[in-house]
Amino acid sequence: MKKIQFADQKQEFSKRPSKIGRRSLSRSISQSSTDSYSSAASYTDSSDDETSPRDKQQKNSKGNGDFCIKNIKQADFGRREIEIAEQEMPALMALRKRAQGEKPLAGAKVVGCTHITAQTAVLMETLSALGAQCRWAACNIYSTQNEVAAALAEGGFSVFAWKGESEDDFWWCIDRCVNVEGWQPNMILDDGGDLTHWIYKKYPNMFKKIKGIVEESVTGVHRLYQLSKAGKLCVPAMNVNDSVTKQKFDNLYCCRESILDGLKRTTDVMFGGKQVVVCGYGEVGKGCCAALKAMGSIVYVTEIDPICALQACMDGFRLVKLNEVIRQVDIVITCTGNKNVVVREYLDRMKNGCIVCNMGHSNTEIDVASLRTPELTWERVRSQVDHVIWPDGKRIVLLAEGRLLNLSCSTVPTFVLSITATTQALALIELYNAPEGRYKQDVYLLPKKMGKKYMCTQAREIENSLDWYLSSHQAGSYLQ
Amino acid sequence: MKKIQFADQKQEFSKRPSKIGRRSLSRSISQSSTDSYSSAASYTDSSDDETSPRDKQQKNSKGNGDFCIKNIKQADFGRREIEIAEQEMPALMALRKRAQGEKPLAGAKVVGCTHITAQTAVLMETLSALGAQCRWAACNIYSTQNEVAAALAEGGFSVFAWKGESEDDFWWCIDRCVNVEGWQPNMILDDGGDLTHWIYKKYPNMFKKIKGIVEESVTGVHRLYQLSKAGKLCVPAMNVNDSVTKQKFDNLYCCRESILDGLKRTTDVMFGGKQVVVCGYGEVGKGCCAALKAMGSIVYVTEIDPICALQACMDGFRLVKLNEVIRQVDIVITCTGNKNVVVREYLDRMKNGCIVCNMGHSNTEIDVASLRTPELTWERVRSQVDHVIWPDGKRIVLLAEGRLLNLSCSTVPTFVLSITATTQALALIELYNAPEGRYKQDVYLLPKKMGKKYMCTQAREIENSLDWYLSSHQAGSYLQ
Amino acid sequence: MKKIQFADQKQEFSKRPSKIGRRSLSRSISQSSTDSYSSAASYTDSSDDETSPRDKQQKNSKGNGDFCIKNIKQADFGRREIEIAEQEMPALMALRKRAQGEKPLAGAKVVGCTHITAQTAVLMETLSALGAQCRWAACNIYSTQNEVAAALAEGGFSVFAWKGESEDDFWWCIDRCVNVEGWQPNMILDDGGDLTHWIYKKYPNMFKKIKGIVEESVTGVHRLYQLSKAGKLCVPAMNVNDSVTKQKFDNLYCCRESILDGLKRTTDVMFGGKQVVVCGYGEVGKGCCAALKAMGSIVYVTEIDPICALQACMDGFRLVKLNEVIRQVDIVITCTGNKNVVVREYLDRMKNGCIVCNMGHSNTEIDVASLRTPELTWERVRSQVDHVIWPDGKRIVLLAEGRLLNLSCSTVPTFVLSITATTQALALIELYNAPEGRYKQDVYLLPKKMGKKYMCTQAREIENSLDWYLSSHQAGSYLQ
Amino acid sequence: MKKIQFADQKQEFSKRPSKIGRRSLSRSISQSSTDSYSSAASYTDSSDDETSPRDKQQKNSKGNGDFCIKNIKQADFGRREIEIAEQEMPALMALRKRAQGEKPLAGAKVVGCTHITAQTAVLMETLSALGAQCRWAACNIYSTQNEVAAALAEGGFSVFAWKGESEDDFWWCIDRCVNVEGWQPNMILDDGGDLTHWIYKKYPNMFKKIKGIVEESVTGVHRLYQLSKAGKLCVPAMNVNDSVTKQKFDNLYCCRESILDGLKRTTDVMFGGKQVVVCGYGEVGKGCCAALKAMGSIVYVTEIDPICALQACMDGFRLVKLNEVIRQVDIVITCTGNKNVVVREYLDRMKNGCIVCNMGHSNTEIDVASLRTPELTWERVRSQVDHVIWPDGKRIVLLAEGRLLNLSCSTVPTFVLSITATTQALALIELYNAPEGRYKQDVYLLPKKMGKKYMCTQAREIENSLDWYLSSHQAGSYLQ
């Protein structure tokens, strides 16, 4: 098997257009590939085994062989990673403990397709504790933490995933989850819509027994809405992506920390006194601006929406047009969600040493393609860091080749993933237990806990989980 | 040559008591060993060459062989690291450009003993541009960036240093700098006092020609004051460590950033909502508190000095005694400068998952020794991260084994090192050019630029350098 | 006419229950009565004329007598107040200038019932410049700035309002605006719903010619929704109260400043180091917390909504239950929007000197009635400041008798009123020019400028006004 | 007696050049004259009694007549003001309570000359409780709170002071304190040096019995150093002005709050989004910048000292030259301590509505004199607020005619005065009890509590007082 270079991986990845822009997609790529502290990457990477997992005979210590992973021997190491993750997932652990008595997922047969990480493992083991049977594939060919997959397989889960799958492997794994004798899923947990798509295409009859779909990603949700519009959605679906907590966490709170982390790990830049322009003042922009302001940077904001512009203004950031400050800033950060915000013209005018990165959407905000011209020299100085050198010697420091900095060069805190995983679990519980007729063949948001009036058990779980969350988080001060 | 484990290195290091507590000592250990982004560590580490540099015949491309390093072939790589460092050292580069005409160090023969890093290389090449001849050894057996040493050797510098020297190598290298036919130093630039000590011991007569010593570290300065008190200091010495800029930068501004960086890289912890106790509200504590408050942590402060306590209070931090909050906090950070601030009793009462780290002084603030008892299990989960596990399963997350987090798990921004290096260069210039009698055989602070009254050329340099600094830093807005 | 005491005024006011809780109601009471810097109160107050305005013959300098105010001689003074207000109302002035050419309100006959202040005058003169004819009464018996009314009358406006109207005067003034020969209103601008109510009751036929109602207050909007539900709303109505800009400004940004201002003016308390509990973490609570944190207070938050609680937590505030901290805090601030948040039990346990105030809703959050018991002594130490003294000598400092601190003891910046006034003007323009059928007999929010899709001229005005706003506000840096 | 206008007062005041620039001088002017909330000014002002206090027969209820004040009948009202002040002076009250047993000032005969305010009264009554006898005069002809003087006289203190003294009265009062049969002072507590000056001039022999001088003001300290230099200082003196706590409080913490308060009370300006330039980044500038940044202003800094400039830079403020931003800013604040920072040329270029004020030193930073030219119109719009109008209609909003905003338009929190008063008391105790020879005829700083080595009882008092302070301030959390 040819050893895949990291840069190639990314190109590979960008060849699969349906994946582009999916927030969580590269999350684990980042975790497993670029951060030596937070993952077991080195361990995994040192594996010299060139045999495809599909060609191996695999059995766990109990003789069970209904899985396909890289190397079952890594199970102990993976178990420790899972245990560490459990520490920062109090809401999920609380849900596991509390709902365990009732087994609200007794009888549920969940087929899942997500990143296979320690955090996912905590989710899967929670679903199992709540009564569900699970079969799982990876939603991304590079994001699987092999040792975690091993621990899951050792624990009896039917997992089909390894790091560095081929496209063919990818669909093979999904098929192995679904197409199994004597077992038919009645719930889908998807991240990106590939699993859902596969069942639609190959096993449409399965939907007769399926009670619902829980989808986490922007892309997957988008596909579901399209199906719904076209009248082709044949089961209820829960849009976890747009829940309030996920939005606040994935954007404002998470980016507030990851902008600093991402810049520091790649460039070791000192923030104090630096001039920074942040393009866009949505939740992500707000998080970036707040963090950099606090670290002593001088922050400018560009924004076209008048309400957001007014907020930036009232928050103390000077509104500018990019061309006003482009010559003087030390760092340029995009978070508009638009295309071609930083074009070649601006790159030409930046000062020597200017750092350019993207926190916004996909890899389209910085026109990186415009930098692939003969007169410019690219120099890879570190992982995720390129110097692009102009003929006069000026260097621009381009991070993650214009892809999302927070996913490529930082990590998503387990704490944040815990929120999402808890929401996914609650959504499964809600859909699985909902009385006939509560949900039609449409896309739903998880019932928000707003009024005290009527509230179903499951929605109350969110509240309770948050309470537990807060209380475990704040040493009991809140719930005494 | 036996391959030295990282953990062993640290023990080795702590065996040499005179080095303990020297701030800059582990700086480059950190840079070269623990941060895969910011250094060429992997390159260096991959060297399988087991021959001691002392046993090799070495020559650079011009045939010069007056140096001893690991591998001259790494010179190109080292050159690039130096060029990158130059970008973030505007004050030093400005000094190089401005003072070059006058050659204020013409005739100076500087012998130096510091960490051999890209930043040091920029300093050495600046001194050379100002007219000085230099010979250099490393002040630490592990901190040398081999590729930088190679670039310096290739550039004609007499460098004697490599990563992983033995104690014997260490003194041999220093001796090779000093004991050379036909060349006698007239200036000393030291970091830790070992070079000074060696000359005192072996070549006391050399001091007749030496115009002065510039010393950067706490330990070295302490030794100089002892010599001075004992009436044995026979040349003037400049205490660079206590200059205002160095203090503010090394402590307040630097720690404000490195506390976040150090915690994030090691634990990926989310700061928002975490309860943190910071022990000590000096400059370091102020920096830590400000950063964590800005990231949404709830911060408590312990402080015994009433003035600092009052400041913490007026800055909005709740003053506590450690035992009041020890059960509820998620993170404990020491920056008191004292011993045994966090003792076993407190560690016993921390909650599961509590992170404990030291930003203060040496490795004495956390009583790590008290954790080396049979009933506790240590588990190294990542580099610099240990889980200490109590019999009931409670885990404490101990960072860097209680050594300085900012040096072990973060990096010192080049920007900050630039301040120190500029101050060192100015101190050399001042001492070298001072008229007879300005400096006695005593320890001096660099003349502070306070009054407009009388100000010597060199002191004005500081001001000018700072001006250039600011201006280059702020895109000319300040000095137009 | 009996001179009405300030305290009596407030009681008078609270006798009219339909007014309670209307945000803007006491705004001008505050401005004209309690703040000697920001108003011309003393001038007005010094008038000894006891004759009722209704009994006087009144004419302005041009011989026009279609108005009824206190004293036309105060016109010059009022004019200056209006000119000062114009300085801080850039959006409204921009709208005046820009839309003036087109006269988008040509033919509009606007009857208004709002507070008569300098800011209202700028609005009225803008409406007039846009082509409208106006007749105006006061929506509150105490809030009229007599000198501004005089300036308006002198300028040709038919104003019927003075400070200290009786209830009978109040309705007489409204009637004089509506019931006039040869003039019939086709637009209503109301604040509180009294004008709308009067027309419903007395002149229902007028609605045939009325194109719409613009309503600003919570109370008035509430009444409109009730009418709408009951199927009795016979014209379209615009709910200005719930527009995004108004909400953000009236709550978050405005309270961030007025909490400091209100506390300082009444108590001169130093914020640094004080322990404060803020009850409720909605927009108002967020503003209060941010301001006090920045001033060095130690802030605790109580919150029952889990999402808001999580936000408080992630913003770095410790979540508590009130009884946990009630004994130790120096200041208690309510902003929950609920009743009886601070009850006698808590008041009994507060420490000596504790300051208690309400920033939330109406005057119901602090159970002030429970303090009117024989064993407690009330001492009015300053305007708006009472010491309530327990038998053991403990004093609680109660501000504004539990009414809204920001309205009673601070001022609403003209800048903020400008946003509201601009929105009102745009709502009038929109309703007046909307093509047949765009608006039904229902309550609408002003079309939010969200999508680029379709946007009517008037909605674009909002955007443009905001642009002008920002540009005038930021010295052209934004729109160059 | 001619009624003195407020404006005249200020001119009167500025005729006495030795007083200019004394920080605390106008403090009480501000308190008693311009802030209707925080003082009993209106009460005092309403007095129509035109007889000079010197011409009246005065006796308190016990028949004691050794005082001279405005009106003994105001004693009850003054007593309440004193009691309110006691609430916010915990350190002083703690000192009173703790040291009372020992009576460390038994036998002390203190003659004082300070502002006569409620806070001073708390100090005097503390000195008395510690064993001292006191005689007191005012250090400023306008700053006396008559009702407080009455309460003191009623309580048996020999007070000679009233609001609106003539110059002749001023010296007469001082003389009455000093020149009394059968009583000779052995301690001096001075604020401004007038009392000390008077004794030097008239009763030099008194110094034989005087154990020391405690001086609070810049001016007074300056005079003492001059005396010392000239060899004419014949007793030890304590410089209270330069104590650490006073500096931090009077400057950083106090100005952080008073800049907001002063601007808000005078102009009701909204801070959010305003562009502000702060001239000078010393402690005062740091306080102003921090506060305005937190309120959402965009803040620029001008600074000539490179260290301070670097701090501003690292704190996130953009360094500018005044002429770069003068056309665009909304507010200009001076805090340099220099002269003519804002000259006519800059004033000419400010935009319409720009607010200009001084937080720095004396009244020299803004060249107000340059605005007294025929083509400019001055319009007093409110107390302390002038509009200066250019021929083209442009208005500049000048606050407090360029005098110190924090003293003219804000109040100094009692909390802060408590620090100073405690320090004064401790300085008296220290000087009075110091063993022969500890203090020579020189100017001293109060022994700083630095080292654990040797510390006299009195210095420990500071620490203890601060402890009490903190503990009372933080509800016991610190000292449990």
Image (cartoon, coloured by chain):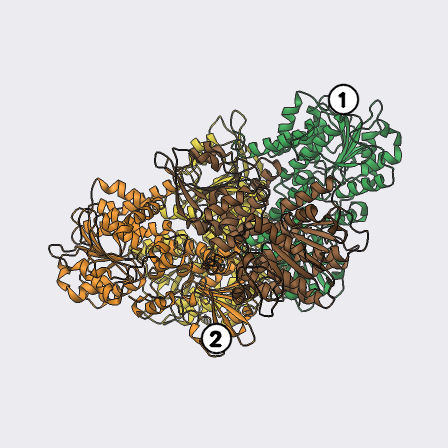
Chain colours: A green, B yellow, C brown, D orange
Task: Give the answer, above or below, for where B123 lies relative to C219.
Answer: below
**Which residue is more in the foreground, B432 or D323?**
D323
Task: Give the answer, above or below, for where B329 lies relative to D141.
Answer: above
Q: Give the quadrant of the N terminus of chain A.
A: top right
Q: Share a chain, discs 2 and 1?
A: no
Question: Circle 2 sits on which residue?
Answer: D344
Tag 1: amino acid: Gly
Q: Residue furthest bottom?
A: D374
Rendering coords of residue A398 (x, y %): 67, 57
Query: Can residue D339 be seen?
Result: yes
Q: Is residue A337 left or right of residue D114?
A: right
Residue that appears at 25% across and 58% down: D161
Tag 2: amino acid: Arg
> Which image quarter: residue D399?
bottom left
Task: Give the answer, above or below, for where B165 lies relative to A397.
Answer: above
For label 2, count other residues whose C-alpha is less than 10 Å away and answer few (under 14), some (14-19) or many (20+): some
Circle on res. C374: none
Rendering coords of residue C249 (x, y %): 60, 52
Tell me the SS state at disc 1.
loop
Task: Please state the chain letter of the residue tagged with numbered disc 1 in the rendered image.
Answer: A
Rendering coords of residue D261 (x, y %): 46, 56
Rendering coords of residue C32 (x, y %): 50, 55
Circle on res. A107: 1
> Which image quarter: residue B304?
top left
For label 1, count other residues whose C-alpha is less than 10 Å away and answer few (under 14), some (14-19) or many (20+): few
